[in-house]
Image (cartoon, grey):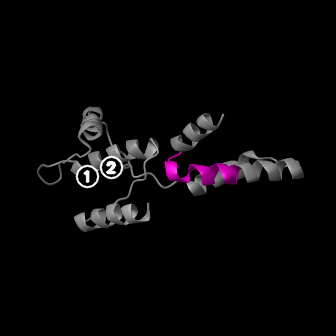
């Protein structure tokens, strides 16, 4: 049951590190609903909405057909460099790939500079 619940929460972009806390919140909602004989659907959906980060997917993105191959490269090489002329869609395809990772439960951050990525990676390592 917990495995299915975790998969459902990941489908709502809740990252793996937040799953236990999310399940605890949902359990509290269910317990309260049992005590008060109240409806649980609206409170559960609201809690999931608040816990789930906004998607990084670019609005209106049209699949190009290469996204799966790029994700495979990223999975096997653990790094992916997108290069090309300005305004060819590098950012949009990166957002689409990041969105797919987000849906798989990864925490995704959007930044404008390499320094931001370095800080995010190194600060996370110091915490863990």
Per the image, is 87 magenta? no
What kind of element bears circle 1? helix
Per the image, is 17 magenta? yes
Q: Nearer the viewer, residue 35 or 121?
A: 121
- Name the chief secondary structure element in magenta: helix
Residue shown at the point (82%, 53%) measured from the top left = 32
Say left or right for 40 vs 5: right
How would you rate the neighbour count of disc 2 (Cα within 10 Å): few for under 14, some for 14-19, many for 20 or more? many
Tell me the magenta residue range.
12-26
> Vertically, is 40 above or below 1?
below
Residue 70 image position (x, y, % from top left) = 25, 37
Verify CB contact (< 8 Å) between mark 1 and mark 2.
Answer: yes
Residue shown at the point (68%, 52%) measured from the top left = 24
Would you name the residue on which mark 2 appears? 95
What kind of element bears circle 2? helix
Residue 56 image position (x, y, % from top left) = 39, 52
Residue 45 image position (x, y, % from top left) = 66, 48
Q: CA distance from mark 1 to mark 2?
A: 6 Å
Q: Which numbered circle lies on residue 91?
A: 1
């Amino acid at each position: 049951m917990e495995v299915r619940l975790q998969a459902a929460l990941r489908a709502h972009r809740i990252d793996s590190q937040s799953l236990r806390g999310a399940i605890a919140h949902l359990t509290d909602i269910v317990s309260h609903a049992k005590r008060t004989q109240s409806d649980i659907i609206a409170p559960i959906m609201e809690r999931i909405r608040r816990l789930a980060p906004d998607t990084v997917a670019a609005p209106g993105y049209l699949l190009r057909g290469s996204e799966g191959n790029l994700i495979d490269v990223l999975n096997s090489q653990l790094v992916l460099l997108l290069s090309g002329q300005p305004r060819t869609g590098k950012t949009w395809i990166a957002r689409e790939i990041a969105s797919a990772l987000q849906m798989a439960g990864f925490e995704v951050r959007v930044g404008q500079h390499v320094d931001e990525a370095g800080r995010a990676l190194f600060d996370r390592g110091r915490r863990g």
